[in-house]
Amino acid sequence: MIPSNIYYSKNCMTKVEIDEGSGFCFGVVTAIHKAEEELAKGGKLYCLGDIVHNSREVERLKEMGLVTINHDEFNRLHDAKVLLRAHGEPPETYETARRNNIEIIDATCPVVLRLQKRIKQEYDQEDTKDKQIVIYGKNGHAEVLGLVGQTDGKAIVIEKPEEVQKLDFGKSIRLYSQTTKSLDGFKEIVAYIEEHISPQATFEYYDTICRQVANRIPNIRKFAASHDLIFFVSGKKSSNGKMLFSECQKVNPNSHLIDSVEEIDLSLLSDAGSIGICGATSTPKWLMEEIYEAIKNRI
């Protein structure tokens, strides 16, 4: 029996498959369920920032009544209900909510929440002046802003392994990572610091990368390598999408990033014996299924 995520064309010349391991991670699923539950009760629900970095899913929830706001709008809001997405928020967001009588529906991912608490505990220790708290992550990313906020803005953010050189190796270092960063990049940074840190300083690192995300890398490489043609479905804003798409390209140069049915290049379909559809932790299953159905109808 052929699994429901695999289709063979009538002449059995082309196979189309959706990657079973792709789609929303646990944190995003929880945030969306919380939003849907609140919206079902009626009344107005705001979300601080896009609930997920996928414009199609944001649009679907907007049609259900979810209103996306930025931090400036949040600061002006009073007596309202606001959902905090999986990425998490810095302490001042909660302070503003208390001050403005805003009810918070907190959908911060538990993995991110544990990381925030760990960084806060590190920062609150007495020897804070003598050490650098370093976060391997994307500057300006919502999760990273929430993490840096635990240190009153004093944490140092490095986006790429080569940026590690800007650290002061004469001072102690405590290294953390954004939960969705590359494990290989993190290991590279650890190795460089271990090699260059002064004997008078101490270095401790905490692998805080979410395994649900990290484990997708070997899986998606295997999936992409097993097909002639890959359509990687992701919103253009998704950091995780950019990272996983680049992994697809490494093993299969015939990989294409799309965000909708309209972006499918039909000219690519005729030469492919097998077509794979996969996506990021911010890609809804329904969108991959929509693309799967569209391809089925054209081969």
Image: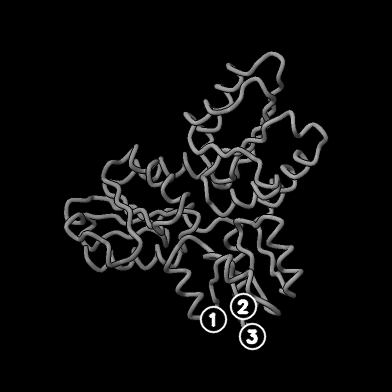
Residue 23 drawn at (x, y percent): 48, 57
Residue 255 drawn at (x, y percent): 30, 47
Under mark 3, the amino acid is Gly
Q: Secondary structure at mark 2?
A: strand
Residue toward you, 294 or 240: 240
| Label 3 packing within 10 angstroms: few (<14), some (14-19), many (20+) | few
Work out whether residue 128 can be spotted. Answer: yes
Under mark 2, the amino acid is Leu
Whether residue 134 sits left or right of residue 182 in the image: it is: right
Label 1, label 3: how far apart the Cα atoms are: 9 Å
Residue 240 drawn at (x, y percent): 47, 49
Asked whether the beta carbons under mark 2 and mark 3 sit within 8 Å of each other, the answer is: yes
Q: Which residue is mark 3?
A: 43
Between discs 1 and 3, the one toward the N terminus = 3
* On screen, residue 142 above or below 148: below
Farthest residue to the bottom: give it.
42
Residue 65 circle label: 1
Q: Residue at x 41, y 66 (%)?
A: 287
